[in-house]
Amino acid sequence: MILSSGSGSALASGWPGVMASLLYAVAALQGGRQERWATMALPAAWMAHLLALIFDLSGWGTGGQGTRLGFAPVLSLTVWIVIGVHAVESRFVPLPAVRGWLAPVGVLVVLLAALFPGDSRQFGSPLAAFHFVLGVGAYGLFGAAVLHGALLDAAERRMRMKGPSPGGGTGMPLLQLERLTFRFVEVGFLVLSATVLLGLFTATQWRWDHKTVFSLLGWAVFAALLVGRRLQGWRGRRATRWLYVGAALLLLSYVGSRFVLEVLLGRPSA
């Protein structure tokens, strides 16, 4: 069978996603002889995921002009950043259980990006493109913070059940894990603040839509978390609850609003 150039481009743009999904599925395996293959599969899946993101965001092979934006591509990019952070950390502190969490999520977001590729958009200016990059960067940093917060909560639960251990079963001292969690929050808050300020300058018309409201609510929650931690010494579950609430609000701001428009209402956003 002879393939046209358009169908050939579509196939070429789709194979990295297929490979990423398969490799993430292998990386999700745990224990025994599978452990070695799973450990090697994760970085390979991460690289295939990167290629899939390049094709998805650029719209290569689909005939679209500009960058493809939507809830699924942004969610996929966010998870890719979080997995990259884990890959760097695992060089110093092996965390095989985390791989078992992240790999299935990687499969899910790659498939979502293939099913809901978004729509092609042209950025009005370089500042608008930078605003988008900062926003995705904030998503990735807070995603990494949520991952570490979940590890911190799990370690504290194990300590209460089994008694104290050096790292609560995480392979990392709890104080170091806590500092790392809120370091991600601090850097993420700075990036989010820059995103909000840049949005004020790049928006042609300020609108109090769902994206704006949820973004500002998320910013306020993270600001309260950092102030409470600095002045009141918030730690443990109290601090991570604020982290989860802020991350959920931030997720609703772009991904949530785009999901409603693209999937529930069946139309692109303005």
Image: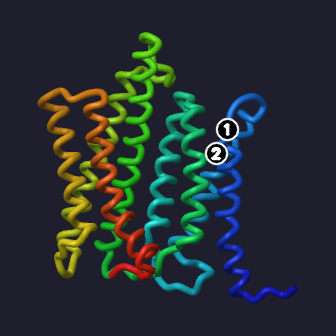
Task: Name which residue type carries label 2.
Answer: Leu
What residue do we see at 55% from left, 31% from top? 95
Give x and y (percent) for residue 166. 45, 14
What residue do we see at 70% from left, 74% from top? 12
User: What residue occupies the far front of the structure in this picture?
Assistant: 264
Label 1 crowd bin: few (<14), some (14–19), many (20+), radius 10 Å: some
What residue do we see at 23% from left, 74% from top? 202
Q: Quadrant of the image for the C terminus?
A: bottom left
Residue 39, numbered circle:
1
User: Number of numbered discs present?
Assistant: 2
Helix, strand or loop at mark 2: helix
User: What residue occupies the far right of the structure in this picture?
Assistant: 1
In the image, residue 169 above or below residue 66 = above
In the image, residue 157 above or below residue 189 = above
Give x and y (percent) for residue 82. 47, 47
Q: Nearer the viewer, residue 22 or 8?
A: 22
* Circle 2 residue: 42
In the image, residue 208 above or below residue 215 = below
Answer whether labels 2 and 1 touch (C-beta < 8 Å): yes
Give x and y (percent) for residue 103. 60, 46
Give x and y (percent) for residue 189. 25, 48
Q: CA distance from mark 2 to mark 1?
A: 6 Å
Tell me if 93 is positioned left or right of 202 in this view.
right
Task: Name which residue type carries label 1.
Answer: Thr
What residue do we see at 64% from left, 63% from top? 17
Helix, strand or loop at mark 1: helix
Q: Nearer the viewer, residue 27 or 4?
A: 27
Residue 101, numbered circle:
none
Q: Quadrant of the image for the N terminus?
A: bottom right
Figure coloring: rainbow
**Location of residue 55 by image quarter:** bottom right
